[in-house]
Image: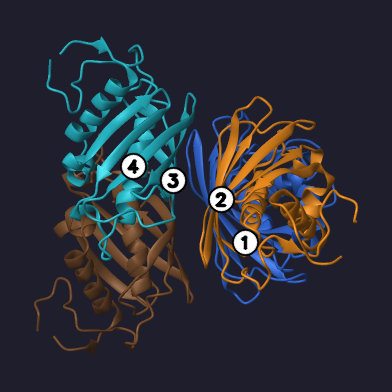
Chain colours: A brown, B cyan, C blue, D orange
Amino acid sequence: MSMRKLNPTRFVKSVFGDFMKESGLEPRLFGPFMRITNAVPGKVDFELDIAQQHTNRLKILHGGTIASMVDLGGSLAVASHGVFATGVSTDLNVTYLSNGGAIGDVIKATAVCDRIGKTLAYTSITFTNKNGEIAARGSHTKFIAKVWGKNEPYTTDKPIHGEQPE
Amino acid sequence: MSMRKLNPTRFVKSVFGDFMKESGLEPRLFGPFMRITNAVPGKVDFELDIAQQHTNRLKILHGGTIASMVDLGGSLAVASHGVFATGVSTDLNVTYLSNGGAIGDVIKATAVCDRIGKTLAYTSITFTNKNGEIAARGSHTKFIAKVWGKNEPYTTDKPIHGEQPE
Amino acid sequence: MSMRKLNPTRFVKSVFGDFMKESGLEPRLFGPFMRITNAVPGKVDFELDIAQQHTNRLKILHGGTIASMVDLGGSLAVASHGVFATGVSTDLNVTYLSNGGAIGDVIKATAVCDRIGKTLAYTSITFTNKNGEIAARGSHTKFIAKVWGKNEPYTTDKPIHGEQPE
Amino acid sequence: MSMRKLNPTRFVKSVFGDFMKESGLEPRLFGPFMRITNAVPGKVDFELDIAQQHTNRLKILHGGTIASMVDLGGSLAVASHGVFATGVSTDLNVTYLSNGGAIGDVIKATAVCDRIGKTLAYTSITFTNKNGEIAARGSHTKFIAKVWGKNEPYTTDKPIHGEQPE
């Protein structure tokens, strides 16, 4: 596939597709259950269909699943600025407020890149359960000195997750 | 199996076995790669053989895997006080300092329960990579009002993870 | 002064006045430089005129001043639900994004109580500098089991900060 | 005073003295009540005599005072590596475990620089109350790209806090 410039939603889906292809954790944990629903520069919406593998001993969404989505969500929020690499984590915080849901429920997330500089990016995320309550919120700071490539923003030759290759 | 009182290491292994049997995330993510190496009241040592499913796009230990171990480790540190249920999370923090390792490396963790009260337990954890460097450290606060059962501490009828049933 | 029911803004100002009278840190650090500008149930706006005592060696707003406002702001967000006592802290996080300002600048804060239960309250806060940038954001979890008194919410016999006693 | 090389304890005291002279918050909040008791490369011990200005409405050590000491302690832990400037904060976390003490009590702190790199430094801190309990613990990540001066480490022409100028 040749290099082309994408809109933010399709670009973030291409980055998400790269996570699903190149990373080990995301395909293992989120597999076919997660999808990007929208992206604009600095903000990404995604959701997860809660499956058995996402739950804890109480049979509800696991805090570790949420923490992993704080990590991934922050990376996608960075990517929404048009960069394909998304750096490494420095600090990650999660506060758990309410039951995130049971198997079959959908949990929705909105990840925001509050600031992106030359070396650090600051992201935050909110998770909403099926009742519209805040299930959790998090913060994720990333070291991104090396993400600034030579490509024009939003340009990639990678396929787009969820779409058939052209 | 009948109720019996165990030493802290075997008791924590029985709780860990329950996570592997009843929870969804732990068997999916940590499967046969994680083991408890020691437990005393208030402190648990465990380790993970890093596999493909634990890695990120840079092919090293994923921040989400570490965050999930902060969650689990805090629960095991609570369990090391002799309780089978381990409550729900309120706050979880992780700071990432160094490369945690690549596939085939071992990451070691020591989780400590700094304080356990009637309603809240405070835990912290340190991860050490194969070079002996601090790869990450974390904090996990749990709401535990409902973990205090009628059983004597360290008493369970559950099997012990990694041992053949007697 | 006799017991009376106040609207949320005046009630939060009465709690803030109690901090200024009964606490040691707030009058010492924030003195006449801080004011509540608005409160509705679950949300409080306040601002600080940055003075010499709030700054660091770089002559800008000190991270410790911001952290102290995360603490106070969370308490005021709890109070905005009509309770006079505001519990004790369990976890507090701050992420610093931008310069908060220099002496003479105003920093604005909005503190939100995302959830209040019987034993725990979850608050978050955002600080905005004079350029409209997010200077910092924070999270503050409080243990509030003992704040539920016998009074009807928003009822107090205390004076209101910034108003002449009637 | 001419440039001279100091041992870590005296060097950290000279940095602390600079905080007391050039910063606004530290002299206002900690004034004569705080002192450095020891420093080695990567670790600083200090203590605070709790005074009225450090307390909350419950007449015990205020969470904001502790958070401000997490901030300062992290800076001093960076300084213990021999640098005079100590960077700016990116993330700060505090977990509150026990009563820190009342007026007249001493709270002790040990701040550690877990890792110092070219752009980021990672510090953690533990506070111990008069009963030897962990009152609080914290984490403080700093951006330090600009602290690396041309001076040899531990070299300064500044006076040493608590000593008469030579």
- Report if residue C94 is visible in the image: no
Q: Mark 2 points at which residue?
A: C41
Q: Do labels 2 and 1 share a chain?
A: yes
Q: Residue at x 41, y 53 (%)?
A: A137
Q: Which chain carries label 4?
A: B
Between label 4 and label 3, give the one nearer the viewer. Answer: 4
In-front residue for pair A83/C148:
A83
Q: Are marks 1 and 4 on the same chain?
A: no
Disc 1: CA contacts within 10 A as few (<14), some (14-19) or many (>=20)? many
In-front residue for pair B85/D127:
D127
Residue type, numbered disc 1: Ala
Q: Mark 1 points at which residue?
A: C109
Query: How far apart are labels 3 and 2 at the CA level?
Result: 33 Å
Marks 2 and 1 close (CB-CB < 8 Å): no
Query: How far apart are labels 2 and 1 at the CA level?
Result: 16 Å
Between label 1 and label 4, give the one nearer the viewer. Answer: 4
Q: Name the residue under label 3.
A: B138
